[in-house]
Image (spheres, grey):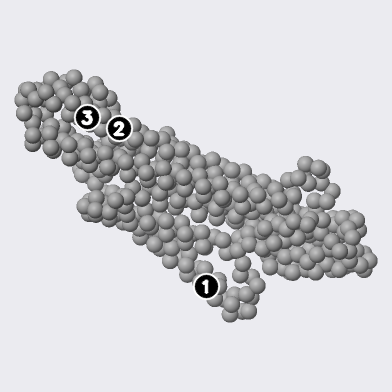
Amino acid sequence: MAASSLSAASHPSEILPTLNSMSLILNPYPFILHAIEEQKLQFAYRNLLSFDLALIVVHLVLLVQATITLALKLFFLLKNGQRSQIWLCRTHYLVDQAVPYLVPNGNFVIEPLQITGCIFFEFFSIIVYLVIKNPNLGMSIPGLHASCLFWFAASFVPGFIGFWLSGWSAFYVLFLSPVHSTGSSGGRKRILYHPVFMNAMCWGVPVLISCFFTVIGIVMTVKHKRVRDAYEVLFTRLHQLAEDWKPNNPQTLNDNQHLVNIMEFLLAEGSRIFDLLQLMAIGWATTAAVIITFYIATMITIGKVTQRTMSIANGRSTLFQHSSKNLLSKPKNLISESHDDLNSKAETDYSPVTLSMKPAFRNSVSANSIQRNLFFIRTSCGLMVIALGFNICTSLIFVAKIRALLIQTYWQVTLFRRVKYE
C-alpha cells in the first residue's frame, strides 16, 4: 500500500482525470484524507521521540563536560598566576615579516566551540521534541518547527571550525619553531608562507564554512515553513470539500485542479528540501576531506621536524645552523619579540655572541618533554583524521540514502515486525 500511495502521489496531475470523474458522482475527499493520514503514520517513526530525548541527554552531558573543562582551565590558570596563557588568538611576528601571523590557541578554542555546537543541537532536539509531543505548539508558534532545520545545519559548524583551528594551532607550533626556516624557500613557498595568505586560509575557511551552512539552514527553514503552510491549506481545503460536496457540481473541477496544484507544490518544495539536505551532507564530506588533507600534511611535517628537534635537544645538532644565515642578513631593527601558542617568550638580541652560540649541553629531560609533546600532537591529529573519516562515510551514506530512509518506509515496517516478534 505504501508503494502504491507513493507512486500515485509522485505525479498528482495523473490522478486529476480520475478525481474529476469520481467527484461528480461520489464524495472522494474523505478517502483522500484517510490515505494522507495513513501515509503520515507510515512516515512517522514510532520511537523518534525516544531517540530525540536520548540526543538531548547526550548533548547536555557534552555541554556540561565542555563547560566544566573550560571552567577548570580558567580557574587553575588564574590560581597559578598564568593569566597570560588565556587567549584565543595571538599575533606572532617573524624577523623578515612586517605582517603578523594570527595564531589560534588550540588549548582554548575547542571548549567554547563545543559549547556552542551543543547549544545549537540542543535547540534542534528540543524543538523537535516539543513539536512531536505537542503538535498544536508548532501550529501556534509560526516558524518554530521550521527553525529546527536551521539549528540542525548550524550545529555542525562549530565542530568543523574546532577541527580546522586546532589543526592550524598544531601546524603553527611546527611552523614557528626555531628549527623551521622559510628564508631559503623558493618564490612559490614564500607566497604560501606569507602571513596574509596563511591568515586568510586559517580564518577565511571558518568564515566560508559558517556562511555556507548558515545559508543552507536559512533556505531550508524558509522552504519548510512554506511546505507546512501549504500542508495546512491542503488539509483545510480537503475538510471543507468533504463537508460541502454536492453531486454534479461544476465548481468541483476547479476545486480539484486547485488541490492538485497544492500537491504538486508540496512535492516540489519537499524535493528541494531533500536536495538541500544532500548538499549539506556533501558540504560535510568536502569540509572533512579538506581538513583530513591538512592534518595529514601536518603529521608529515611533524615527522620531519621531530628528528631535527630531537637532535637539537640531544646536542647532536646546532639550533642556529638553521637560522643564523637569515639573522645575519637582517638589520637590527627587524629583530622583534615573538610569541607562540606554547606560551613561550623569547627576546632575540642581535649580537655576535648569540650567533656564535654552540650547543654545549645535552638535556635528556628537555628532549623527553619535546618528544612527549610532539607525540601528543601526532596522536591528536591521527584521532581527528579517524573521526573526520567517519564523518565522510556518514555524509556519503546520508547523501546516497536520505530519500530511501525518509520516503521508502519498508525498512521501518520490517524493523518494527522484527522487534515486535522478538
Quadrant of residue 399 in the image?
A: top left
Question: Do the numbered discs 1 and 3 sit on residues whose CB atoms are within 8 Å?
Answer: no
Read off the residue under disc 2. Answer: 265
Binning the other alpha carbons within 10 Å of mark 2 as few (below 14), some (14 to 19) or many (20 upward) gives some
User: In the image, residue 213 lies at what x, y percent?
Assistant: 48, 46
* Label whose residue precedes the other's in the sequence (3 or 2): 3
What kind of residue is marked 1?
Answer: Leu
Image quadrant occupied by the C terminus: top left
**Location of residue 83 (image quadrant):** bottom right
Given the current orientation, which residue lies at the most extreme front position?
251
The residue beneath circle 1 is 72
Q: CA distance from mark 3 to mark 2?
A: 11 Å
From the viewer's perspective, is 298 left or right of 136?
Answer: right
Answer left or right for 396 relative to 28: right
Picture layout, residue 86 above or below residue 206: below
Nearer to the camera, 194 or 232:
232
